Structure formats: C-alpha cells, structure tokens
Amino acid sequence: MNAFQASLPLTLDFEVGAIRRMGDKVAPFGTKVFLMVDPFLEGSEWVAQVTASFIERGIEYLEFYDIVPNPRHTTIDRAVDQVLRAGCDVVVAMGGGSAIDSAKAVAFVAVHGGNCWDYTERLGEEVRRPQRRGLPLLVVPTTSGTGTEATPFAVINNPELGLKCAIVNPFIYPDVALIDPQILVSKPPKLTALTAVDTFCHALEAYISIHCTPWVEMVALQAIRLFAANAQRCVEHGTDLEARANMAFASTLGGMAIAGAGVTVSHALGQPLGAMTDAPHGGTVAASTPHVIRWTLPVAAEKFATVAGILCPETLGLSVNERAERLPVILEQLFTTLGVTDTFCSYGLRPEQVDEFAHTVWTSFNQDLACHPKPINNQEEVAAIVRMCF
C-alpha cells in the first residue's frame, strides 16, 4: 500500500434535529454571530430554530441574506465589512454551496484582511495564503451536493473578469458542520437532481485523480454507492427522510474525497462555465463528464469499469474494457432520468468563445487539470475537449 495522509480538521454532527442545538455548538467559540443564510430560507422554521437557540444561550446575532448562486467577490467583501463593523466573533452559515463557500471566505478574510479575490488561486498571479485560521465557523448544509462542509475550498465568482476561482487553504475548513437531513425534504426535484450529480462527480473525479489514496478510494466509492441507491429516490420521493439522509452523507463523503485528491477535468470546465453563464454547477459538470470519460479512455479503464458496475450491475458480466466503455452511456441515461440534460451550448457558451474559454480553464484551473489521469499538455487540448461538450 502506498503511503498517504488523511486529515479532516472539523467536527461533523450528523443527526435529525441537529440545528436546534446550534446555540450550544456556538457558545464555546464566541458571543456575537454573523449569520449568513441563503435567501430562500428567510422566514423559515429552520432559521427560527437556529436563532431561538442563540437567544436561549444569550448569543447576539446579525442576519445576512445577500447571497446568490456562484457567490460574488464583491458580496463577500461587503459581508466582511459588516462583520468587522459589528464586532462579530463567530460566523454561522445555513444554505447550499454558495452560502457556505461565502461564509468560509468571510471568516477567513475578516481575520487576515484585504479583498477575498486576493486569496483565490490563479496561475501566474500573486496569491495570499495565510497559515492560520480565520474566525470560528459553523455551517449547516441545506443541499446534498457540494460537500463544502468537508473541504478546504471556497469557490468565488468574479463577473467583472469572467472568472470563477477558489481559495484553497487547509485553514479554511469549518470548525463544526451540523448535517440535519430534515432540512433537505423541502428541496425541489430539479435542485435535488443537480446537487446529487455534483456529489457523484466529486466522488468520481477524486477516485480517478492521480492523487487518489486508499483513504480517498474508500470514501469516494461509498459516496458513489450511496448516490446510486438514493439519488433517484430523492428526486421522485423528496420526503423520504432515509434517502435524504443517505444523500447528505454521500455529499459529505464526496467533499472529503476531493479534499484528499482534488477534482479533475469536469470541474475545471464546469466552474468557469458557471462564471460565464451563471449556469448551475451540477448541470455544468453533468454536461461534460460523459465526454471527458470518452476522451480519457482507455486510461483509468479499471476504475471506470468499477463505477459502471456500481451504477449498472447488469454490466458486471462484461470485461473491464467493455464496462469502462459503457460508462459514458450509463451516465447520459442516468442524468437524463434525473432530469439533468443540458449541454455547454444550451447553457449559453458559443462556438466563437471556445478558445477564450479554454484559456480561462488553462490559466485558472490548471491545478484541477493536473489531477486528471490523462495529461493535458496545452490550451488547445482543453479547447478540443470543450468542443466535445457542445
């Protein structure tokens, strides 16, 4: 067995009703909370439960709802300013990946100063990489997709530059993640499907990454098994609490997997497409993944065959190469069944933009490209893969 390290420097609290104890979880960290919440939760019983728990413990709080999909760097900087002016000493986030990534950036920048964009990874650019934590951070995921509660990443959109880049720092992990499956039952089918696909792609990409370790392999394959058994159930029967809990666990496992091994080409393409077009992240990675697999074969054939066998057990009688070759079709059919059918073209990318788009991928997501098992040597190869996704 190859040597490896595994680290998850946060507390995961996985329980139905966990958010009612948020005040108890916050109390050891501070007395004034900056509460960042997805706007669709404003006025909800979930926010009421959290704020009631603060009141019971005598904890002050300031609510912040200015969060949009593909979180903007300007919004995060405004939030940091509010944190500093109000004297908040703890950040709490409730929501999907946008809310939690925003909160991770806010907690970090509030301590280290400057603008949040200065902390994002960009090839050839000066990047701030502090080596100590920001403000204490507690998060409540309300979707089963990003797994950001278990990663050292915060993805940030800069519309002025047309870029979507990530802070990558081991000191940006939340301190505590409360994962409460009861919150998930209200999520509509389309959002459920998009976030489920994102969970799958996290697990798949970490599994095939050149940095995959035995730890990552174990975690990623379990996430894929949970996705295979529960994603369709969550889309068709959203109130199934057991299926929702399993997908929530899959999402967290997917986050743990990419924390250990990174993502690969599908995410390197999906992130900037979301920045350019505001397309949903789960949809952008779904649009590219089958094509990326076709381009990658026969490299990683054994791993692709393993995934095909999990998603479609009927293929287990085939040879390794035959199963691997079936995986793109299996995924296209599965994504269609879930209702995730868009392409790069339908999301608004135009053929004349491909070269510019490939340049963005090559310069801003080179870390992700470098994790892929089949090397990409230049921007022109990126453009060729992008054209496949039309």
Image (cartoon, rainbow, N blue to C red):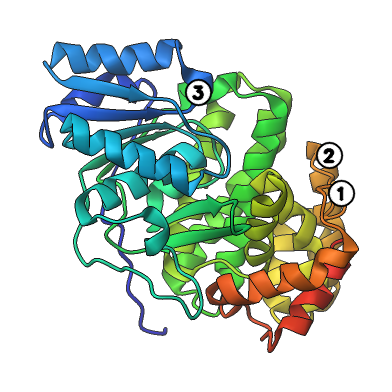
- Label 1 is placed on what type of residue? Gln
CA gap, disc 2 and disc 1: 6 Å
Q: Secondary structure at mark 3?
A: helix
* 130 w.r.t. 179: above or below: below
**For residue 95, above or below residue 308:** above
Image location (x, y in percent) of residue 378: 70, 87
Type of the residue with mark 2:
Thr
Which residue lies under the disc numbered 2? 337
Which of the numbered marks, if any, corresponds to residue 24?
A: none
Return the mark for residue 333: 1
Residue at image position (53%, 46%) is: 146
What is the crowding at mark 1: few (fewer than 14 residues within 10 Å), some, or many (at least 20)?
A: some
Identified at 49% across, 33% down, the residue is 67
The image shows residue 385 at horizontal and vertical percentages of: 80, 73
- The amino acid marked with disc number 3 is Pro
State the separation of the CA atoms marked 1 and 3.
Answer: 33 Å
The percent coordinates of residue 177 (x first, y second) are 33, 39
Earlier in the chain: of badge 1 and badge 3, it is 3
Q: Earlier in the sequence, mark 3 or mark 2?
A: 3
Q: Nearer the viewer, residue 300 or 349?
A: 349
Q: Residue at x 43, y 25 (%)?
A: 65
**Residue situated in front as seen by the camera: 138 or 193:** 138
Where residue 38 sits in the image (x, y, percent)? 48, 28
Within 10 Å of disc 3 (Cα), the crowding (few <14, some 14-19, many 20+) is some
How many angstroms separate mark 3 from mark 2 (CA)?
A: 29 Å
SS of the residue under disc 1: helix
Give the residue drawn at x 31%, y 28%. Answer: 35
Tell me the residue that label 3 is attached to: 39
